[in-house]
Every structure is written in structure tokens, then in C-alpha cells.
Amino acid sequence: MKPVNVAIIGTKFMGKAHSNAWTNAPKFFKVGLKPILKVACGQDPAGTQEFANNWGWEEVETDWRKVIERKDIDIVDISTPTYLHKDIVIAAAEAGKHIFCEKPVALNYAEAKAMYEAAEKAGVVHYLNHNYRRTPAIAYARQMIEEGKLGTIYHWRGAYLQDWITDPNFPLTWHLQSKYAGAGPHFDLNSHSVDLARYLVGEVDSVMAMLKTFITERPLPGQGAGTFKAGTGGGDKGKVSVDDAAFMVVEFANGALGSFEASRFASGRKNYNFFEIYGSKGSLAFNLERMNELQYLNLEDPADSQGFRDILVTNATHPYVGAWWPPGHIIGYEHEFTHAVVDFLNAIEKGTSITPNLLDGLKGMQILEAGLISAKEGRRVKVAEVQ
Ligand code: SOE
């Protein structure tokens, strides 16, 4: 296995998920390239050192520009909050590094366009981490759709629901400020659902959306824009500048209709990434909180015994599963990231591209930005209006 040096920028939730994936990919899958966890970069020196010790990164750095300048780095993994994506991606591309970038792609369409163009110009492999495409049940859903099992698709019904900010005293972290996050669940969660809808149904032609912020002011965080620690700002509050919930209805280019619900105010729903697809020959339903299962209804089954069946997507013949455990020994969230790293390393080795990438990010952002315009102006917006 030829070694490739990886630098990771960002050491929080996604930094951990990605570190785990870089470590596990060559252990479970046959890959031609061996990722070397070379350098971890974070803003806080002590925290970054602890992160590096725990996950096996050889060195630490606190300035991402110094990481990009290093000649020995082949891959830059961007696990930072959204507002840093554009500058890091463009700098990494110009330095000829392959790019593994977290979602949502950027703060807006213009940034996403600049990022995509820089990566294409540099000829590097670029990947945007909409990890759910690599859930085996979802990859299998795509296979079933390609085999024609659903026939003509009529409806996409998607929902991505969470509840982690229902407490009005939850602090004003970076996720709740548009200058850091771009938007609320409309970008954080709808970006995932839009990516899955594009993957499974097709391109979106027009959008109507409504966004809502329920809690408009929140306690200032104790320290730094990204901390989850409770507010200690002596009662000071700041303005929430993103949505708390974002609902959209869309028409796909192929004529199907779709709906998307994204919310951080759905009490009891932790990471409820759900969709149903209805077609002329059958239907599919998926919920991430039961991620090893795919529900399938076949309209060719006899009417009296017809109904949704639960497919346990854990056979060696299902996508990615053969590398893990015997049938029925289920897998989890973190495996999606490992699958992404495997496909990314294979793309670099073979000199091919991988999806979703920065072009998918750009196309997804075009749909999300059409949603923002629709919500603001109260009208149906053609996706192509966003340029
Ligand atoms: C927080 O809302 C979050 O971590 C998202 O940012 C991720 O993309 C999603 O996979 C889980 O929830």
C-alpha cells in the first residue's frame, strides 16, 4: 500500500468521525493507498494535542495555512465549521492537495462556485461529505431504483428532524449565526436531504419554501463561537440569525413532486433522517434511526398480502457490507464515513472522480438558495434563477 499523508483541519464532532474513518478504512477494506494521519490542526493548542494523541495524528498545528503550505501533505480533510470551507478549499486546491470536505459546502452559492472552479482548475480529487449516500440501505435503494423496481417516481417525501436547541437557554453557538453557518437546518439538514433526493430521484426544477426562527435571542456562549458550553455571558443575549425550521416543496425536472421538512425543534427526534419514495411500481421508506433497514412495497405482490416489507440490508451482497460482519450484525453511523474514505482513496489511486463532490455541493446549494429566495419573496422560484 502506497502511503498518502493526510492533514485534518477541525477537531470536534466531524474531526472525530473522520479520524475514525481514516484509521478504519484500510483495516476493513482493500485499498491501494494507506492514509498516514500526519497532522491535526485546531484553534486550541492543548485541545488539539489531546485530539491528536487520542486519534493517532503524528503532529499538531494551530494555523491551517501552514498545513496547506506543507509539501508532504497529499490530502486535506476539512472538518471545520462552514464559514472556513471556502478559503481552505481554495488554498488546498491551489496547493495541489486532494480535498475531503464536510458539508454544507459553503455559506452561499457564490462561495460554492469559487470552490468548485478552483478544485477543477487544479485537477485534484474533491469530495463533499454527504455521508448518508454511503449508508448501505441508501446505496441499495439507489440500486433498486436503477433496476427499475419503483418505475416512474411520483413523490419524494423527506424529513430531517432534530431537537437539540428546543431549550431557549441553549447558547448562541456558531450553528445559530448566519456569518458562520449560512443558514440553520435549511443548510445543515436540508442539504443532506437535497443531496439524497438528487441521488435517488433527480434534479430539482423549482422550489417553494417557508423558514421560521422560533427563539430569536439566545444567551451568548461562554467562550469562542463554536462552544456548546452553557452561556456564561452574565445574562447577555445575542440575535439568532438563522432559521430554526425550514420546509420546502419542490418539483423535480422529471415531473415528480417532493417535500422536505428540516427542523431542530422536533422534540423527541434526535437524528431522524427520513424519506419515502413513491413510484408506479413500488415504494421505498428509510429512517436513519433504523439505518440497517429499508422498507419496500412491491405493487406486483398479490393485493391481499401486499404491504411494506423490511429488508435487513446486511448481506455481503449489499453495498459495502461484505467488508464488515456476517449478515444481521448491524453497522452504524460511523461506517458511512469509512465507506467515503475508501471510495475517496480509490478515486485518488485510479485518477477518477468521486460523488458527491463540489459540483454536487454547488447544485445542492443552488436548490437551497432558491429556497431562501422563495421564503423571502413568498413565491415559487426556478432553481436556474440562482447563478
Ligand atoms: C448537527 O445538526 C449534525 O451533526 C449535522 O451537522 C450532521 O451533518 C448530521 O449528520 C447530524 O447532525
Image: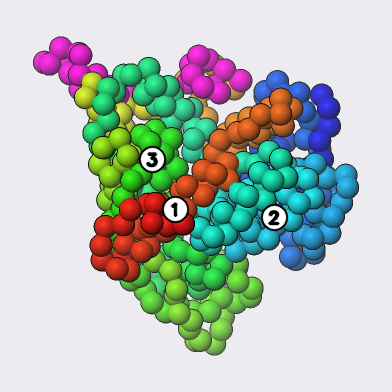
Q: What residue appears at the point 56 percent right and 75 percent down from the top-left corner?
A: 221
Q: Which residues are magenta?
A: 296-323
Is residue 319 one of those drawn in magenta?
A: yes
Q: Which residue is mark 1?
A: 366
Q: Is residue 26 magenta?
A: no
Q: Residue 127: which quarter of the image?
A: top right
Checking the image for residue 90, the label placed there is: 2
What is the distance, in whole Å, between disc 3 and disc 2 at their CAs?
26 Å
Q: Is residue 116 left or right of residue 296?
A: right
* On screen, residue 257 above or below 219: above
Earlier in the chain: of badge 3 and badge 2, it is 2
Q: Residue at x 23, y 21 (%)?
A: 281
Amino acid residing under circle 1: Gln
Under tag 2, what secondary structure?
helix
What residue sits 26% from the left and 66% below the top?
A: 378
Front residue of 311/103: it is 103
Image location of residue 110, percent across then percent down: 54, 60
Q: Is mark 2 within 8 Å of ligand 1?
A: no
* Circle nearer the N terminus (3, 1): 3
In the figure, 282 relative to 384: above or below? above
Q: How many marks?
A: 3
Q: Residue furthest right?
A: 71
Q: Tell me whether circle 3 and circle 2 mark residues in contact (CB < 8 Å).
A: no
Q: Which residue is mark 3?
A: 203
Label 3, label 1: how far apart the Cα atoms are: 11 Å
| Type of amino acid at the residue the image marks with label 3 | Glu
Mark 1 vs ligand 1: CB below 8 Å: no
Mark closest to the chain's N terminus, 1 or 2? 2
Query: Between marks 1 and 2, how big is the CA–CA gap?
Result: 19 Å
- Quarter of the image where the N terminus is located: top right
Compared across the picture, whether 236 is left or right of 1 comes to left
Vertical placement of residue 317 versus 239, above or below:
above
